[in-house]
Amino acid sequence: MSVSRNGEMDPLGSIDPIIHAPARLQLVTQLYVIEDADATFLSNATGLTWGNLSSHLRKLEEHGYVEINKGFRGRKPRTVVSLTDRGRAAFQHYRTTIQTALGNLPD
Amino acid sequence: MTDDQDLKILEQRTFRAVVDDGLWDVVIAVFFAMFAFAPLLSERLGDFWSAAVFVPVWVATYQGVRVVRHRVIAPRVGTVRFGADRRQQLQRLGVVMVAVNALAAAVGVLAFIAVQLNWLDLADGGVAYPLLLGMIVLIGFSIAARITSIRRYYAYGLLLAVAALVGEWLWREGLAVHHGYPVMFGTAAAIILFTGLFRFTAIVRSHPATHDNAMV
């Protein structure tokens, strides 16, 4: 947790920017509740185009949050994506941070 | 979408999005079509064979559904592997469905034997049998609806349970033959079949076939 200028603890300061982006948050949340899914399902579930999906997944992969396996179903290419242990831990941390930050807001 | 409840709802929605393609409805409809057609066939084939001829029909339907799911649904909707909790739930559902079907089959066989030995007169005490069958069907479908979160299975359970009872009443009033099974289960199976086909068509139309060539 980071410290704000007035010296108070600032949970929002420690939010993971990789997960926080709306499209990636959608992807990580979706992958968190299942074991794995192919790109067709992820594209349908998030409404992302192939290009956007590809770039967000690549970013998540670079940070070790998802594992991407390419294969074939018959003769057609099939990309299967799963959340890594690191990705799960990062999402759990993100949830805790957000819940703490929102819980501290005045009514 | 960070709450435990939200995540549970998301998992249920994911499950429905992948599994609820209308094809299970077709399997259910074909299964219950036997109740409609078997009594009509029994005059020609006898009680055993009139039911037994449906086994290859069920197998063919199930295999056909698997092929359609693989060739038509998967390229459009995508595929998902669910977590351990969901897999355990589905295993439990499988066991419950086998138990419910075994119970229904046992009730059917016992009723058949009882009628053959003149221990049971379906014309007199027959209300108990459709009532029991209706309850078994209702319980089975309610469990399936609860586990899969597909709410229309509750309606199917109710529809089939009512079919058994109304069929019996029609038969007693002299308005239908064979305890009303052909007309009532035939109608129920047709409703379930068309509901499934409608859902299947809607999914195929709203999800164009695609493959992830564009993925880098």
Image (cartoon, coloured by chain):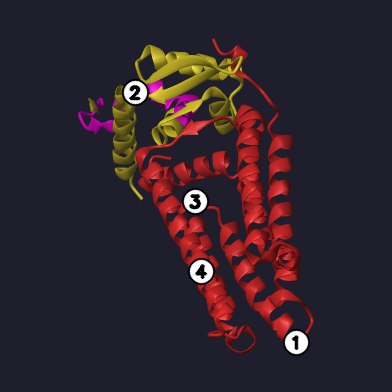
Dot 4 alpha-carbon crowd within 10 angstroms: few under 14, some 14 to 19, many 20 or more: some
Q: From the image, state the color of chain A.
A: yellow
**What label does residue A84 carry, if any?**
2
Please give the chain letter of the residue carrying mark 3.
B
Query: Which structural element holds mark 4?
Result: helix
Tag nearer the camera, 3 or 2: 3
Kind of residue sitting beneath label 2? Thr
Res. B170 in view = yes
A19 and B98: which is toward the camera: B98
**Is B126 placed above or below A28 here?**
below
Q: From the image, state the color of chain B.
A: red
Looking at the picture, how far across and down is residue A32, in whole percent? 39, 33
Looking at the picture, how far across and down is residue B3, in whole percent? 37, 44
Residue shown at 41% from the left, 53% from the top: B95
Please give the chain letter of the residue carrying mark 1.
B
Query: Range of the magenta residues?
Result: A3-27
Kind of residue sitting beneath label 1? Glu
For the C terminus of chain B, which image quadrant?
top right
Residue B206 in magenta stretch: no
Query: Which structural element holds mark 1?
Result: loop
